[in-house]
Each structure stands twice: as C-alpha cells, then as structure tokens.
Image (cartoon, grey):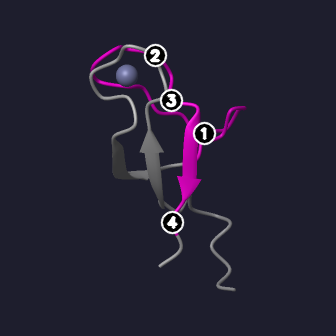
Amino acid sequence: MPDNEEEPTSVTMAATCRTEGCPEAGVTYVVRMYPNATEPIYRAQCGQCDQPITDLVTVTA
Ligand SMILES: [Zn+2]
C-alpha cells in the first residue's frame, strides 16, 4: 500500500439511490469521492430526491 496518509485520496464509489419513488432509485452512478474529516466519511446526495445515498460501494480498480 502506498503511504498517502498526508493527502486525502479520492475513492471511486458506486452510489445507488434507494429512496422509494425516486426516479433515480436503483440507478447506480460511479463517482469519485473524497473522505470527510468527520463521520460519515463518504457522503453522497441524490440529485433527484435530495436524500442522502445510503448505498455506497467502494469500487476497486
Ligand atoms: Zn433519489
């Protein structure tokens, strides 16, 4: 593992909205995210329903 602890490293994540009734529900977007200093470390918000996306999966290259 490279020693990158001094700089936040972006992570590729698959984000899927699970909000019932959302037009984007079940649609997975692959996005690059940067870790936050506080929990939750990774945050995403659906552009359609404005709800936080709970289904975040790290994509390993
Ligand atoms: Zn949504």
Residue type highlighted by circle 4: Val
Q: Position of residue 20 (x, y in %)?
A: 46, 16
Q: In terms of secondary structure, what is the magenta stretch mainly?
A: loop
Say which mark, if any, is on residue 53. 3
Q: Position of residue 34 (x, y in %)?
A: 50, 49
Q: Quadrant of residue 41?
A: top right
Label 1: element kind: loop
Question: Which of pointers 3 and 2 lies earlier in the amino acid sequence?
Answer: 2
Q: Is residue 2 left or right of residue 53?
A: right
The residue tagged 4 is 59
Residue type highlighted by circle 2: Glu
- Check whether the beta carbons of the residues at disc 1 and disc 4 lie within 8 A of each other: no
Query: Between marks 3 and 1, how big is the CA–CA gap?
Result: 15 Å
Query: Between marks 3 and 2, how big is the CA–CA gap?
Result: 12 Å
Between disc 1 and disc 2, the foreground one is 2
User: If the picture is divided into quarters, which one holds ligand 1?
Assistant: top left
Q: Position of residue 35 (x, y in %)?
A: 58, 47
The residue tagged 1 is 36
Label 4: element kind: loop
Q: Where is residue 14 in the image (x, y as percent from the top left)?
A: 45, 52
Residue type highlighted by circle 3: Ile
Q: What stretch is highlighted in magenta?
A: 35-59
Residue type highlighted by circle 1: Asn
Up the image or down, 23 lies above or below 17; here it is: above
Q: How crowded is mark 2: few (under 14 residues within 10 Å), some or many (20 or more)?
A: few
Question: Which of pointers 3 and 4 lies earlier in the amino acid sequence?
Answer: 3
In front of the other: 6 or 20: 20
Asked if the residue at label 3 sits under 8 Å from ligand 1, the reply is yes
Q: Residues within 10 Å of mark 4 (few under 14, many from 20)?
A: few
Q: Residues within 10 Å of mark 3 (few under 14, many from 20)?
A: some
Say which mark, if any, is on residue 20. 2
